[in-house]
Amino acid sequence: MIADARSVSHDEVVETDVCIVGAGVAGVTLACEFAGQGFQVLVLESGALQRDDDTQALYQGENVGHPYYPLHEARARYCGGSANFWDIDLGDGRFGGARLRPLDPVDFEARDWIPYSGWPFDRSRLEPFYERAQATFDIKEPSYATDLWDDPGERPRLDFVGGAVETVIFKFGAQDAFFRRRDEIVRRADNVIVLVYANVVEIETDSSGQVVRAVQVACLHGNRFSVSAKHFILAAGGIETPRLMLASNKVRTAGVGNDRDLVGRFFMEHLHFTSGIYVPSKVSGPMGLYDRIHVVNGVPIVGKLALDETVLRRERLLNQNIQLLPWHTTPAGLYPGVVSKAVSSLHAIASERFQHRAPRPLGAHLTNVVAGLDDVATHIYRKMRRAIAARRREKIRVFRLANMTEQVPNPDSRVSLAPSRDRLGQNLARLDWRLTPADILSALRTQRIIDAELRRARLGRLCIELRDETPPLGDVPIGVHGGYHHMGTTRMHINPRHGVVDPDGRVHGMANLFIGGPSVFPTGGYANPTLTIVALSLRLADHIKRLMEGRA
């Protein structure tokens, strides 16, 4: 059932068995799993079933790192959470879907070329939960094997001759299926209450800081009360969860669960950017598997390109995928300029020679040109081809590369508290999103490998726009942004020196505090996080059920 926190008496203590903070994807999944169990569940949601501007404003915060979305626009503070942002046209008359794919097996491994990588279990431990997660979206076929989803006639895959590049399938989960489950729980489950307009502002512990006694709730309406429970689950997302933990500092000055200064660190996103052009050969055939959504046996799917994990290991790369977006351009547009030290020095020399004077420092410019003769030759070649192509007026069909790559876990990329406060007296979140050189250079190397494999299979070629000359991050693509995928800030690790929660999602050093959602991801892979969020929430729900039954 649903209830309004504004009707709770001031200073009242509400008692329950399990308290969930947040009714987003993780919180709703947990509530659905607890429905009908022999214990009481209270879900505390800041918003209601629809957006409220005053409540949404509580998400305001500061961005001090790499440019990012305004924080109050990057999250949805009402029932459903990020599911309210799912807006993909599924191609079957439904609008509002989320991309679904499990993380790859390699994503769970401790990779020696990626600092801080490694989950405390391998993917096989999540396989049954991935299958259950798909069922929540009414998807019956669990497999992502490309053979089950492509079709040689209607949606053929690119026929690479080697195994370096592979076609991977993304499914789409319908928003209405997720919301239908939410509404069934909200309206019908006798043991589950969703309390709306309930803003959790503090986690209250005992004097040891190891047991949560209650959470303090404040309403914009004015009343405040507390909720006590046997077990508490924070499911408020990768920014709000660490914000709440850091702000709960009355007993432990560093915040709840933060004795080792890990809460809020390792903020990760999926880097999204459009860079590069795929020019198919005349014999490459239709591209429908990649450039639009198909509904196959009732499931919307699309194909993307990725590197085989053996290549990732050999080349020591981050995992990423590339979607092909249909685009029309003139032939001149296929020959972008080369940006490098050598070409910049060549331009400087040419400019000064035109004015009959020697550039300074001439020696350094000449050294750059000699060291980058390949770039100079490519620049001259492309300039000539653009001049020739400019005389041709026809449009040609090519594909822009929509890149989505995982990010190196970085402890300096973090969520912390800003000194300014919101209307309820909570410190605002301060996001310092940081990229590393590997984030960009790995994408460049991936494109070069795909280009080589396309040419090898006579499928066409890539026009690569990324460069590796500009310090400190290489040629950062214009407009690189995240995907509202807030991961890593309460990362999972078996050792409390390296993570905030243990493999069961319990905060290290805390007896009854758990975290659900993407903030526990140690690494992000290239797959959208939704399916893994649901799978981990199902796994956590099973653990909590065992605890309530005295079996864990």
Image (cartoon, rainbow, N blue to C red):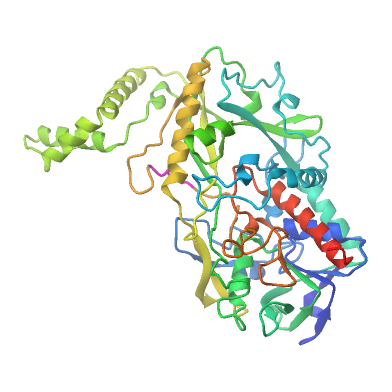
For the C terminus, the image quarter is bottom right
Q: Residue at x 44, y 50 (%)?
A: 436
Q: Percent position (x, y) of residue 482?
A: 54, 50
Question: Residue reaching furthest left?
Answer: 356
Q: Residue at x 26, y 38 (%)?
A: 341
Question: Residue reaching furthest bottom?
Answer: 11
Q: Total marks drawn?
A: 0
Q: Is residue 344 left or right of residue 304?
A: left
Q: Is residue 479 magenta?
A: yes
Q: Residue at x 67, y 67 (%)?
A: 507
Q: Nearer the viewer, residue 461 or 537?
A: 537
Q: Percent position (x, y) of residue 498?
A: 57, 61
Question: Is 305 drawn above or below residue 391 in the view shown?
Answer: below
For the N terminus, the image quarter is bottom right
Q: Nearer the viewer, residue 93 or 174?
A: 174
Q: Nearer the viewer, residue 387 or 436?
A: 436
Question: Is 281 drawn above or below residue 29 in the view shown?
Answer: above
Which quadrant of the structure image shows residue 35? bottom right
Can see residue 422?
A: no
Q: Percent position (x, y) of residue 147?
A: 72, 24
Question: Residue reaching furthest top?
Answer: 283
Q: Is residue 310 left or right of residue 435?
A: right
Can see residue 524?
A: yes
What is the span of residues highlighted in magenta in the rendered image? Answer: 475-480
Question: Is 502 drawn above or below residue 253 in the view shown?
Answer: above
Question: Is 524 drawn above or below residue 53 in the view shown?
Answer: above
Q: Percent position (x, y) of residue 357?
A: 6, 37
Q: Is residue 462 magenta?
A: no
- Per the picture, the main secondary structure of the magenta-coloured stretch is loop
